[in-house]
Image (spheres, grey):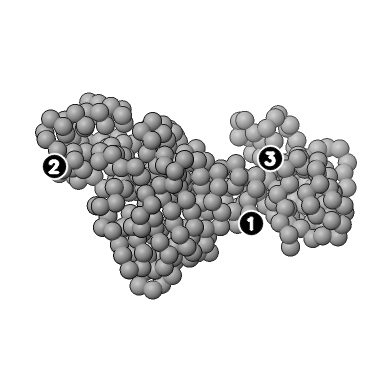
Amino acid sequence: MSSLLQLQSLSCGYENTLITEQLDLTLAAGEIACLLGPSGCGKTTVLRAIAGFSPVLSGAIIKDGQPVSTPVFTLPPEQREIGVVFQDYALFPHLSVFDNIAFGLQGKSRAEKQRAVTELLQLVELPDLSDRYPHELSGGQQQRVALARALAPRPKLLLMDEPFSNLDTDLRRQLALEVRGILKDQGIAAIMVTHDQEEAFAISDKIGILADRKLQQWGTPPELYYHPVNPQVAGFVGKGELYNGECLNETTVKTELGTIEFAEPFGASEGKKLSLFIRPADIRPSIEHGDVMARIEQKEFLGCSVVYQLSLPSGRQIEAEIYEPLMLDVGAEVSLHVAAHRPIAFEL
Ligand SMILES: Nc1ncnc2c1ncn2[C@@H]1O[C@H](COP(=O)(O)OP(=O)(O)OP(=O)(O)O)[C@@H](O)[C@H]1O
């Protein structure tokens, strides 16, 4: 796949206030990516720089092999052939759905506009709503119209800033999958900003974790989930906690959850101090006696799983999530078994 967009050592900010530093990433044609990170880390700032709405402080943005932003040059947004969908949809309230979508088709004849808008409304599954006005649409419908409007000029790259955040959870998931289908179908690449890790996993080929001004990791969802490069990334892609441990040999680590035996050596030798990232679903409480006993403080039945709140001998509170009907009682003393096939370990 050819590279559509490259950020090269990109630093962005406002009036010399540095917000993000030395970002490097490559997006291939047709690839869908998400930027995830804590509030205020600069996700929107990066998106605005790619769209051409903000200048860059250093480095470069390259699109189709040509620099579009450097500290001394900013190609105007309208010349970038990049579509943008904002969080608040930003539809023109006084224009009908037809005219909102046709807005991006300046210079085309009425007949061409009619054909393109009809096709786009089919694509976003709103074929009968072209005469309505934005206030006559639901949030999900408005978002589909915003998407159709951004797709009208046939961009090769679409930028979406929290496009589903005003929608309820079920609709978000449904629309995220639909949007992925539409983009893949049309071969359009996208970068989406979101707070929601599950949404990012559902829609993305690649995810970038932004934190502390840096792009901490850029990779596929499974790469980030199974091989996070640091605890910050691990904490962003699924629930879990860090446990300090000491290696007894190259497959065994002693932690406050007990001694954990890993299936394969993972490159650490005796005496090495580690921090292990362990997810609730990897901890299994059992009524059998073990070298560390924990107490069940609470249990939450979630239908397909049960979440147990446990207190360790140190007083630390942790969670275990079990996907089978293992109905242990609150107050029970349990041993803990850690599923040890995929260690996520960081050196201390
Ligand atoms: N126009 C501006 N001028 C100066 N500072 C700004 C401007 N816009 C944003 N900032 C600051 O830049 C930082 C990053 O903001 P940005 O909106 O990019 O973060 P974000 O990761 O998208 O946040 P959120 O997830 O809360 O939307 C924040 O500290 C913000 O206050």
In this orientation, does residue 41 appear? Answer: no
Please state which amino acid type lies under the numbered disc 1. Answer: Asn
- Give the label on residue 281, or none: 3
Please state which amino acid type lies under the numbered disc 2. Answer: Gly
Residue assigned mark 1: 230
- Give the label on residue 107, or none: 2
Q: Rounded to the nearest whole Å, what is the CA distance between mark 1 and mark 3?
A: 20 Å
Residue 117: image x %, image y %? 21, 32
Which residue is pictured at 82% across the width and 60% down the height? 272
- Labels 3 and 2: the sequence-earlier one: 2
Which residue is pictured at 31% across the width and 48% down the height? 82
**1 and 2 marks in contact (CB < 8 Å):** no
Residue 315: image x %, image y %? 76, 56
- Disc 3 element: helix
Residue 317: image x %, image y %? 71, 52
Which residue is pictured at 26% across the width and 58% down the height? 76
- The image quadrant that residue 229 belongs to is bottom right
Question: Looking at the image, which is closer to me, 312 or 195?
Answer: 195
Which residue is pictured at 71% across the width and 56% down the height? 346
Q: Residues within 10 Å of mark 3 (few under 14, many from 20)?
A: some
Please state which amino acid type lies under the numbered disc 3. Answer: Ala
- The image quadrant that residue 268 belongs to is bottom right
Q: Rounded to the nearest whole Å, what is the CA distance between mark 1 and mark 2?
A: 50 Å
Residue 197 falls left or right of residue 175: right
